Image (cartoon, rainbow, N blue to C red):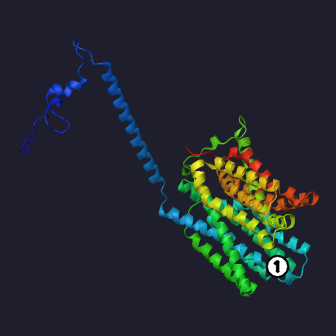
């Protein structure tokens, strides 16, 4: 069938150049022509020059490819809007969790005076909070798997707020202790759930962000304590104060639920860009089940070491500075402030340090700082040195609990949330048992000897940090 025009035949390849202009056939085929059988051979230095030029071009090509590959990875790992919103939502959950209980703590002396109880009865009643956390802690994993980490975290926040309000309004020791038991149980469930959702968001990000959540928890605790101090200074009754704080932070948690990640928590492993469990350092030659058990036990000890150092600052720093070193009351409080402040700074910097050097190197370096800093402070006991020692300890252990929770949540062969749940539960058990142990050692010898638990915790982490992940290639 004719179309009214004809297509001219294509010219031979030898007559077409890369720009569409004809070239002589000998010029086009010259690079592929065989070497002449007669005449001078190319000089050896010409071959070397050509080879060096080709190598330089290859290096430039690989460099361009590497830059493009890095740019591509950065673009792929850039979080979407939903993931950025989820990160803010998890930060709100951590903030509310820290602020709720901190609103009640400054009210303890007033509650004790109103109930008319002694130190022994007061101590037993306050111990109901960690007892409730231990009793309900193991149920958190099952709740997370069934209802989702975001819903469980918000539901736990609601129950925690109700328990704290009831504790502040309780008219008897039994009601006070029972409300603290309920609040402690809900707080433990909330802690596991919010960490599980934070780790889920971290997997979407492809880099460490869990330490920033724990830093925000510290900001929430400071905010809650400041709210309570202001309410006390203004003579606001406990009821209106705790009702306002509970409603405020529960409402904030409910709003945050809208922006959490949807779907179940048992997500595929592809979300983690480099699941390098084989890079850990458990006992070699052991079966997978035994290896997982070894890693889990080591993670529990690492997290417990971090809580031991925290408790040393919470329970004993002020007492050691005032009684053993005869510091003034205002100066004695600086030991606890130094530890908490340095821990906050360590958690703010922790994510960048982990991304750059890896969990293993950061944990070992921090453990060394804590052990050496506090060890020197105890070896040469002075007030300024002890304050600096507590600061070094707080900075050194800042990333230990988040690191142990992250690694436990990534352990293979466990149900979603199980490893995180076990580490969190046993860590709380260690936190509950550490004050009596230090107290017994202090009564038998001295508080200075009892505080050797801080450098000992650093040594434990140095020995066990091999189970944490190294730097990603």
Q: Name the residue at the top extreme.
A: 38
Q: Residue 291 location in percent, x, y?
A: 72, 42
**Residue 3, placed above or below residue 248:** above
Q: Residue 443 location in percent, x, y?
A: 92, 61
Who is closer to the viewer here, 147 or 433?
A: 433
**Residue 47, placed above or below residue 101:** above
Res. 221 in view = yes
Question: Label 1: which residue?
Answer: 109
Q: Tally the numbered discs.
A: 1
The residue sitting at 83% across, 72% down in the picture is: 126
The residue sitting at 35% across, 27% down in the picture is: 51
The quarter of the picture where residue 229 lies is bottom right
- Quarter holding the C terminus is top right
Who is closer to the viewer here, 4 or 413?
A: 413
**Residue 415, placed above or below residue 60:** below
**Residue 98, placed above or below residue 414:** below
**Horizontal arrangement in the rendering, residue 38 relative to residue 185 (left or right):** left
Q: Residue 321 location in percent, x, y?
A: 82, 65
For label 1, the crowd category at 10 Å Cα-Cα, with few meaning under 14, some 14 to 19 and many 20 or more, is few
Res. 146 in view = no
Q: Name the residue at the right extreme.
A: 444
- Quarter holding the N terminus is top left
Q: Secondary structure at mark 1?
A: helix
Who is closer to the viewer here, 2 or 117?
A: 117
Q: Residue 373 location in percent, x, y?
A: 74, 54
Who is closer to the viewer here, 73 or 287?
A: 73
The quarter of the picture where residue 453 lies is bottom right
The residue sitting at 63% across, 41% down in the picture is: 279
The quarter of the picture where residue 349 lies is bottom right
């Amino acid at each position: 069938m004719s179309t009214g025009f004809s297509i001219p035949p294509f010219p031979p390849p030898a007559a077409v150049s890369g720009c569409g202009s004809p070239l002589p056939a000998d010029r086009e085929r010259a690079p592929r022509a065989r070497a002449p059988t007669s005449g001078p051979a190319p000089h050896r230095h010409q071959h070397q020059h050509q080879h060096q030029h080709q190598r330089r071009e290859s290096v430039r090509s690989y460099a361009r490819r590497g830059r493009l590959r890095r740019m591509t990875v950065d673009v792929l790992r850039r979080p979407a809007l939903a993931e950025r919103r989820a990160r803010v939502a998890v930060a709100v959950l951590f903030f509310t969790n820290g602020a709720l209980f901190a609103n009640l703590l400054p009210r303890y002396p007033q509650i004790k005076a109103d109930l008319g109880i002694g130190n022994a009865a007061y101590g037993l009643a306050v111990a109901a909070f960690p007892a409730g956390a231990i009793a309900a802690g193991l149920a958190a994993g099952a709740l997370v798997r069934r209802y989702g980490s975001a819903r469980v975290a918000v539901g736990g926040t609601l129950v925690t707020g109700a328990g704290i309000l009831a504790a502040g309004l309780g008219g008897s020791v039994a009601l006070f202790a029972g409300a603290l038991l309920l609040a402690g149980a809900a707080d433990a469930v909330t802690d596991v759930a919010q960490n599980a959702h934070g780790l889920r968001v971290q997997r979407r990000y492809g880099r460490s962000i869990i330490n920033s959540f724990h830093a925000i928890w510290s900001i929430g605790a400071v905010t809650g304590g400041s709210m309570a101090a202001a309410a006390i200074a203004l003579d606001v009754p406990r009821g209106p104060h705790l009702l306002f704080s509970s409603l405020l932070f529960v409402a904030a948690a409910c709003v945050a639920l809208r922006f959490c990640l949807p779907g179940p928590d048992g997500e595929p492993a592809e979300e983690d860009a480099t699941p390098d469990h084989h890079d850990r350092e458990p006992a070699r030659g052991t079966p997978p089940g035994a290896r997982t058990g070894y890693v889990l036990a080591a993670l529990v000890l690492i997290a417990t070491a971090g809580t031991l150092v925290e408790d040393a600052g919470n329970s004993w720093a002020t007492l050691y500075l005032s009684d053993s070193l005869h510091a003034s009351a205002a100066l004695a409080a600086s030991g606890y402030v130094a530890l908490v402040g340095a821990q906050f700074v360590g958690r703010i910097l922790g994510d960048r340090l982990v991304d750059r050097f890896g969990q293993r190197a950061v944990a070992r370096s921090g453990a060394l700082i804590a052990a050496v800093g506090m060890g020197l402070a105890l070896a040469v006991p002075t007030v300024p040195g002890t304050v600096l020692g507590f600061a070094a300890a707080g900075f050194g252990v800042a990333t230990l609990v988040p690191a142990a929770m992250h690694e436990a949540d990534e352990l293979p062969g466990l149900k979603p949330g199980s490893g995180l749940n076990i580490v969190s539960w046993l860590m709380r058990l260690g936190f509950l048992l550490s004050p009596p142990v230090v107290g017994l050692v202090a009564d038998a010898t001295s508080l200075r000897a009892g505080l050797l638990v801080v450098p000992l915790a650093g040594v434990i982490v140095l020995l066990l940090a091999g189970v944490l992940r190294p730097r990603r290639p």
